[in-house]
């Protein structure tokens, strides 16, 4: 790593010095995927590595979880015969996922998982050393495992320890504000990043390779279970022209809002009382679910199923458990009320003998046939109570406020089977920002994909891009131009009355209203037009900034606003193409089918067109600003003969990396 300064001229003629760092491989982000990329780069012989992050304790991986946060891996127990191609079929069956990516995620699953075990992550095993598992959503086998609600946090802690042991340099309090790209043969390549430090001052980093591990689009939604400290930065790559894949495919579900946490698993299986109140959170308390079900037993059995079927699923909207999510949405978004889970008392009319056989058997086998939801929760999962108490919420004494929240983007940037961007060389999107998932994915597969993808990126860099080919002079000039442009934009805001906080609220509300799990056809044209108008106004006027923090947040708004316009446009394209309601989204149209006979008449859904399961939506922002979408056919799972001699030869001569 080399450190220097570069000169940047301002409009007033003054010149100032900006810190300039040159490094072989830059890792942007410090979640589980980014940390693993740095560790694996060192393991593969790449010594000159630097991690840039807003903070080692500020990412989604280290700040999130759920009732039993899941890691999905190849089965490693008993007689359950499993193999990469078998696991790949499970991934591929979710729809709109390329088969070669599915095979890679399956093939490297055990390797990524066992690496974490070797770092000390205490995944459970029996006395014979077998790793026990359970079934998760969209999982035909018992491939899932967990160490409890903080699985990803402990993964990060183990990886941070390894980063420190390897003495990999980490620079915290760095906020990425623009990717650097330069011409490369017939396209473009990554060349580094411009960031701001904690005081709002620019720094430039030039890099042969950029591992882009910035997480999901947490800052795009008003109702979100992403940690407050996580904003995401996919907008930086979209602004640079990086191709995206499957942007409309996200996952939403019930989560608490005061402390952001998924209320899945036992939080639902103990069958709490759902109540709504007026906007003050106290008056006009109602148990609002009951009128929509034939019986109390049916209602409570559906609530129980939300534990297994936590993500909102359009297939379960027509009389299934996702009806609960719709009813919460109606209360909170349409009626403007607030919704709470009350674990202190049972729903009115509750009786064990009215529950479905599945629900009753589960509670019986768990020895949880107890008087109240909180007693059942204390029996089955006492840590679930302590988790909220640790965040100053005592669910033994007060109800828990919830909403339907954005939780994960199955789409993201488009990359090849080595996790390199399909159209920007030397850029490696890993973790949630990589759009390798399709419409549906097994629960916990995101943690697997992050470890697999970061390992693949490290191996590719070590075997394909170990030499330095980037012109430092060209990259430096690109950095100077970027800083000049950003300086001008920030200066423009000096005369503006616009406030980044109000604009952030505006874009987040727009996404939650039209770009989350409920997508009204009639609103999309106006919403997309409004989103791009916000981009135009922001670009022209900027924001008034009083201090360094405002400068950082203003530039965050710049990429967030651009990203939300691209996301909304990609959603409109999917809807207008006729893909219909699929995954965790429900497309509403007056020409659709009734969602449920007890919902208001406007709740009519466009059913899924299954033909689109065999296609992947691609989105690219062209140099002239046009957003281009297309449907590409899904690549099949590769057929591999596994002949040892030829495979060994390809590995020895390095042709597998080409």
Image: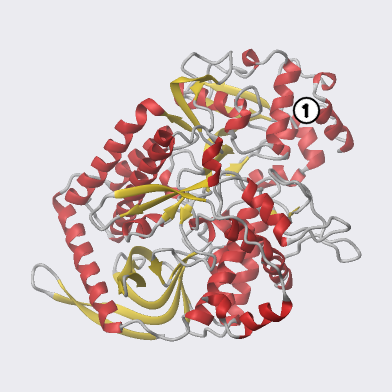
Residue 113 lies, in percent from the top left, at: 70, 65
Q: Which residue is mark 1?
A: 372
Tell me the crowding category of disc 1: few under 14, some 14 to 19, or many 20 or more residues within 10 angstroms, Cα based: many
The reply, left or right, for residue 96 in relation to residue 290 is left
Quarter-of-image position of residue 23:
bottom left
Residue 2 lies, in percent from the top left, at: 37, 86
In the foreground, 269 or 314: 314
The reply, left or right, for residue 445 in relation to residue 96 is right
- All told, the count of numbered labels is 1
Against 550, residue 30 (above or below) is below
Residue 361 lies, in percent from the top left, at: 86, 31
Residue 8 lies, in percent from the top left, at: 19, 75
Residue 315, can we see it?
Answer: yes
The reply, left or right, for residue 656 in relation to residue 472 is right
Against 2, residue 220 (above or below) is above
The residue positioned 48% from the left and 38% from the top of the image is 223
Q: Which quarter of the rendering shows the N terminus? A: bottom left
Residue 229, can we see it?
Answer: no
**Mark 1, secondary structure of its residue:** loop
In the foreground, 290 or 247: 247
The residue positioned 62% from the left and 47% from the top of the image is 441
Quarter-of-image position of residue 282:
top right
């Amino acid at each position: 790593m080399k450190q220097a300064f570069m000169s940047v001229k301002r409009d007033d003629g003054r010149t100032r010095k900006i810190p300039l760092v040159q490094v072989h491989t830059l890792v942007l982000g410090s979640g589980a995927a980014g940390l693993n990329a740095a560790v694996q780069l060192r393991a593969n012989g790449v010594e000159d590595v630097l991690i840039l992050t807003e903070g080692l304790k500020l990412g989604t991986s280290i700040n999130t979880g759920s009732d039993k946060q899941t890691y999905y891996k190849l089965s490693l127990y008993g007689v359950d015969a499993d193999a990469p191609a078998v696991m790949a079929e499970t991934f591929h069956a979710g729809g709109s996922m390329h088969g070669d990516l599915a095979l890679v995620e399956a093939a490297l699953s055990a390797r990524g998982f066992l690496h974490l075990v070797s770092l000390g992550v205490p995944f459970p095993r029996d006395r014979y050393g077998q790793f026990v598992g359970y079934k998760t959503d969209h999982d035909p086998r018992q491939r899932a495992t967990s160490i409890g609600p903080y699985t990803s946090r402990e993964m990060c802690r183990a990886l941070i320890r390894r980063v420190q042991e390897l003495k990999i340099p980490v620079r915290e309090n760095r906020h990425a504000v623009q990717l650097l790209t330069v011409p490369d043969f017939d396209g473009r390549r990554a060349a580094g990043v411009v960031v701001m430090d904690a005081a709002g001052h620019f720094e430039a980093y030039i890099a042969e390779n950029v591992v882009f591990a910035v997480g999901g689009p947490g800052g795009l939604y008003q109702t979100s279970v992403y940690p407050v400290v996580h904003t995401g930065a996919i907008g930086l790559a979209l602004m640079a022209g990086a191709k995206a894949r499957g942007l409309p495919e996200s996952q939403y579900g019930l989560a608490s809002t005061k402390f952001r946490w998924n209320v899945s698993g036992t939080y639902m299986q103990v069958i709490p009382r759902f109540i709504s109140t007026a906007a003050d959170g106290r008056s006009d308390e109602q148990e609002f679910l009951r009128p929509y079900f034939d019986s109390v037993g049916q209602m409570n059995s559906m609530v129980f199923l939300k534990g297994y079927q936590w993500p909102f699923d359009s297939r379960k909207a027509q009389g299934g458990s996702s009806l609960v999510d719709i009813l919460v949405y109606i209360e909170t978004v349409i009626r403007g009320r607030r919704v709470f889970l009350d674990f202190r008392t049972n729903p009115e009319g509750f009786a064990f003998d009215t529950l479905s056989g599945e629900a009753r058997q589960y509670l019986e086998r768990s020895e949880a046939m107890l008087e109240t939801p909180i007693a059942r929760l204390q029996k089955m999962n006492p840590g679930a109570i302590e988790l909220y108490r640790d965040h100053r919420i005592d669910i033994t004494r007060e109800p828990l406020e919830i909403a339907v929240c954005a939780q994960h983007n199955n789409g993201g940037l488009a990359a090849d089977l080595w996790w390199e961007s399909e159209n920007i060389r030397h850029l490696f999107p890993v973790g949630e920002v990589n759009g390798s998932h399709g419409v549906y994915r097994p629960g916990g597969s995101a943690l697997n994909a992050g470890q697999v993808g970061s390992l693949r990126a490290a191996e590719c860099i070590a075997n394909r891009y170990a030499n330095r080919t980037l012109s430092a002079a060209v990259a430096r000039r690109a950095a100077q131009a970027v800083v000049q442009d950003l300086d001008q934009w920030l200066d423009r805001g000096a005369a503006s009355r616009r406030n980044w906080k109000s604009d952030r609220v505006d874009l987040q509300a727009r996404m939650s209203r039209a770009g989350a799990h409920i997508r009204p056809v009639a609103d999309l044209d106006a919403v997309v037009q409004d989103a791009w108008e916000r981009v135009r106004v922001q670009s022209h006027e900027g924001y008034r900034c009083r201090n360094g923090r405002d400068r950082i947040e203003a530039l965050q708004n710049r990429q967030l606003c651009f990203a939300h316009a691209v996301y909304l446009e990609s959603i409109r394209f999917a809807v207008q193409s006729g893909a219909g309601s699929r995954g965790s989204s429900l497309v509403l149209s007056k020409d659709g089918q009734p969602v449920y006979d007890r919902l208001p008449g406007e709740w009519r859904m466009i059913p899924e067109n299954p033909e689109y399961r065999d296609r992947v939506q691609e989105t690219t922002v062209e140099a002239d600003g046009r957003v281009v979408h297309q449907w590409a056919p899904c690549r099949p799972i590769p057929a591999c003969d596994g002949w040892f001699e030829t495979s060994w030869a390809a590995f020895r001569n390095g042709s597998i990396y080409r």
